[in-house]
Image (cartoon, rainbow, N blue to C red):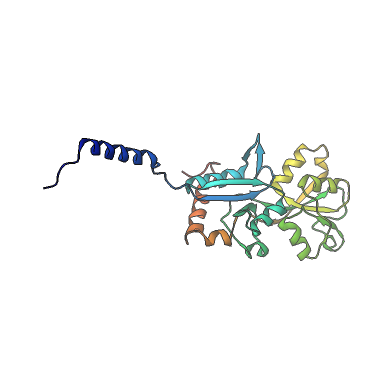
Amino acid sequence: MRRPLPPLACALLLMLMLMLMLATPPAVGAPPPALKLSTHELPPYSTQAEGRPTGIAVEVVRCAAQRMELALELEFVPWARAQLHAQHGLSDGFFAASQSAARDAYARWSVSIAPQQWRWYTLTQSVLQPGDPLFKSRARVSSFVGANMQSWLKEQGYDAQVPPLQSAHLLQMLLLRRVDGILANHLVMTRLLERHPRGHEVRSTLALDKPLGVYLTQRFLARQAADFMDRFDAALRRCTPQEASGKPEP
């Protein structure tokens, strides 16, 4: 039969157990998986209002991240740099981007999160217009740095001039007649034209319908579960505003 511990030994044992309990930190749940995406200043898709990222594309991405319980981090950088950051592992992807073979080489495009039309913008009084057979061979044209549109112009054989950094500068080039036409996003350019005193001097012609989505790098996806992209696409679909109601699906 075991002899009971002396009172002093019991007291010391209780104190030791209490100290161990206090020294052991409480169990904490694992932090949510992180998702860092690069974007750029492109109202109405992405912008920073009083330091808070917002815009029609930003809100869809934020909603999808919340549904998947992802810790979303957004960085605003020039568009060409946003893509370079993804390529070199400084971010997990970028948006809002149209699909291209060059981007597909290192990242995977999501479902569409926002509409985009590539439209030609020319001066109303210009002799050279997109419907003219001579437009392609004679017109000086441009888009902005890092845009799929600029690569497309070169691939199609247009006389693509040195592109500016922003769409606002692109419009200025057209109004100053440094180019005969510019290829731009319809929502972005519509905003700029509405606010410009010479906006009425510009006409537009549809070139291509090119919806925008999110690119996630192959490097990032390789670290995730095999169904991550499918779940991300599903979350984006539920968060994308519907044309009829203008609200996300429940």
Residue 11 to residue 143: above or below: above
In screen coordinates, is 59 left or right of 157? left
Residue depicted at x 62% and y 40%: 53
Q: Which of the 4 image quarters holds residue 25? A: top left
Residue 96 locus on image (x, y percent): 64, 51
Residue 247 visible? The answer is yes
Residue 215 locus on image (x, y percent): 60, 56
Residue 208 to residue 168: above or below: below
Residue 239 visible? The answer is no
Residue 236 locus on image (x, y percent): 53, 50
Is 210 in front, or is 217? 217
Residue 124 locus on image (x, y percent): 84, 47
Residue depicted at x 85% and y 64%: 137
In screen coordinates, is 106 left or right of 236? right
Q: Residue furthest left?
A: 1
Q: How many marks?
A: 0
Residue depicted at x 61% and y 43%: 56
Q: Residue furthest top?
A: 50
Residue depicted at x 62% and y 57%: 89
Is 79 in front, or is 186? 79
